[in-house]
């Protein structure tokens, strides 16, 4: 069975790019358009990994991550931040919220897949 990845991203174009990239290499995708939907989708579907944007409506990625990591049933799910926030201190802020990894937009598809595969233990 293919690994399931939850993409929490409010921009349709960015979701489409991730959908095309990840499904092309065999991942199953779940999608959420804001942080609150992301938390609900994580609880309902228990994905193998989450790709989390930071700047979103309803709940930002920091708070969504904190809520997911606070749930004992979900805290082991790796969360990789995929964000345009690339200033000094942004990665530390994301990791303090509970994120397991961090990649900035624009990203290399190869680099993103390497991070995803490293957290999923696949090649």
Image: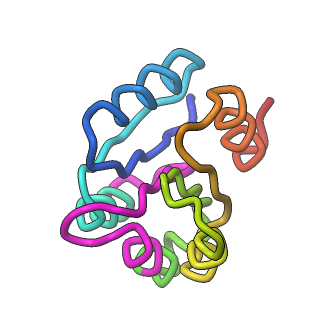
Closer to us: 16 or 104: 104
Q: Residue at x 58, y 59 (%)?
A: 86
Describe residue 37's horizontal placement relative to residue 39 as left or right. Answer: left
Which residue is farthest top?
24
Q: Image check: 42 left or right of 99?
A: left
Q: Quadrant of residue 42?
A: bottom left
> Which corner quadrant holds the C terminus?
top right
Q: Which residues are magenta?
A: 44-66
Question: Farthest residue in the left direction?
Answer: 58
- Quadrant of the rendering where the N terminus is positioned: top right
Q: Is residue 106 above or below residue 56?
A: above
At horizontal 59% and vertical 66% (from top left) the residue drawn is: 87
| Percent of width and height locating residue 57 | 21, 64
* Residue 98: quarter of image: bottom right
Depth order, front residue of 84/23 = 84
Scheme by which the image is coloured: rainbow
Q: Which residue is found at the position 77% from the left and 35% from the top? A: 122
Q: Position of residue 24 (x, y in %)?
A: 53, 15
On the image, the x and y values in percent for residue 101 come to: 67, 59
Image coords of residue 37 (percent x, y): 24, 60
In the image: residue 58, left or right of residue 93: left
> How many numbered marks, from 0 up?
0
Which one is nearer the viewer's eye here, 91 or 29? 91
Q: Is residue 119 left or right of residue 14?
A: right
């Amino acid at each position: 069975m293919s690994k399931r990845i939850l993409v929490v991203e409010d921009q349709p174009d960015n979701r489409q790019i991730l959908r095309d990239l990840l499904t092309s290499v065999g991942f199953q995708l779940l999608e959420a358009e804001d942080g609150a939907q992301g938390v609900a989708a994580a609880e309902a579907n228990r994905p193998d990994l989450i790709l989390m944007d930071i700047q979103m409506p309803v709940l930002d990625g920091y708070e969504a991550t904190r809520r997911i990591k606070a749930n004992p049933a979900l805290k082991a799910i790796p969360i990789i931040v995929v964000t345009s926030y690339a200033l000094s201190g942004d990665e530390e802020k994301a990791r303090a919220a509970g994120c397991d990894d961090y990649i900035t937009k624009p990203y290399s598809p190869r680099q993103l897949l390497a991070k995803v595969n490293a957290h999923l233990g696949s090649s």
